[in-house]
Image: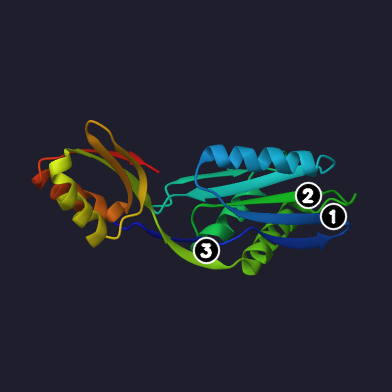
């Protein structure tokens, strides 16, 4: 399974001006639709006087979750060009919001497409791109007598421990690359351990 993807390391900004209209593009790394809502809410507050907040996002290593929103601009004149730029940059887990201040002169659909595309391209060109792996969480339950075998597996695969609980039974939650999880489950189950997985 392909669990690698390219995203941006930090927020980035781009600007495009046309006939008095100003298009401010803001790019963010996001990992859930919940996060997208939070960013949009914050930007709508900050740029409350802007005419439009058009956006698009793409999530997951498989890039299967996406959305484009024209926010009142003519159909497909804003969200789709933004999404197109994220796609052609080969990025995922990225949200780009383009905030438009209307300058009084209509640009027409082709003018809008060009403006949203250019502002987005500008923001993404300013961003530092990094490669990441999609991860999931693996929780293992075991007895004290199996502690050494479990810890050896954790160390061999260099798995970051996210949670541990050593009461009556031992429970350990580790983070692992999605592509590695089936193999890890098999190895833990060979030791007769109870294994549970969850999405990040």
* Residue with the most extreme top position: 168
Quadrant of the image occupied by residue 144:
top left
Question: Could you tell me residue 196's position as x and y percent?
Answer: 25, 37
Q: Residue at x 64, y 64 (%)?
A: 121
**For numbered disc 3, what is the local secondary structure?**
helix
Q: Nearer the viewer, residue 57 or 179?
A: 179
**For numbered disc 2, what is the local secondary structure?**
strand
Sequence-wise first label, 3 or 2: 3
Q: Which residue is tagged 2?
A: 100
Q: Nearer the viewer, residue 42 or 26?
A: 42
Q: Where 71 sits versus 9, above or below? A: above
How packed mark 2 is, by other alpha carbons closer than 10 Å (few <14, some 14-19, many 20 or more), is many
Question: Could you tell me residue 118's position as x and y percent?
Answer: 69, 63
Question: Could you tell me residue 199's position as x and y percent?
Answer: 36, 41
How packed mark 3 is, by other alpha carbons closer than 10 Å (few <14, some 14-19, many 20 or more), is few
- Picture quarter with the N terminus: bottom left
Q: Which residue is tagged 3?
A: 88
């Amino acid at each position: 399974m392909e669990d690698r993807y390219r995203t941006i390391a930090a927020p980035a900004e781009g600007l495009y001006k046309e006939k008095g209209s100003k298009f401010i593009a803001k790019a963010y790394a996001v990992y859930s639709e919940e996060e997208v809502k939070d960013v949009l809410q914050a930007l709508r507050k900050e740029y409350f006087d802007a005419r439009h907040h058009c956006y698009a996002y793409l999530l997951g290593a498989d890039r299967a979750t996406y959305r484009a929103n024209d926010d009142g601009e003519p159909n497909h004149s804003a969200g789709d060009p933004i999404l197109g730029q994220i796609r052609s940059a080969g990025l995922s887990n990225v949200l780009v919001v383009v905030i438009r201040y209307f300058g009084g002169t209509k640009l027409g659909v082709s003018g809008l497409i060009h403006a949203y595309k250019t502002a987005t391209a500008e923001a993404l060109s300013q961003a530092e791109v990094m490669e990441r792996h999609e991860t999931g969480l693996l929780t293992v339950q075991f007895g004290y007598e199996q502690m050494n075998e479990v810890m050896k597996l954790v160390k061999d695969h260099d798995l970051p421990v996210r949670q541990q609980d050593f009461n009556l039974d031992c429970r350990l939650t580790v983070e692992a690359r999605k592509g590695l999880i089936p193999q890890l489950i098999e190895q833990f189950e060979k030791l007769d351990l109870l294994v549970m997985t969850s999405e990040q």
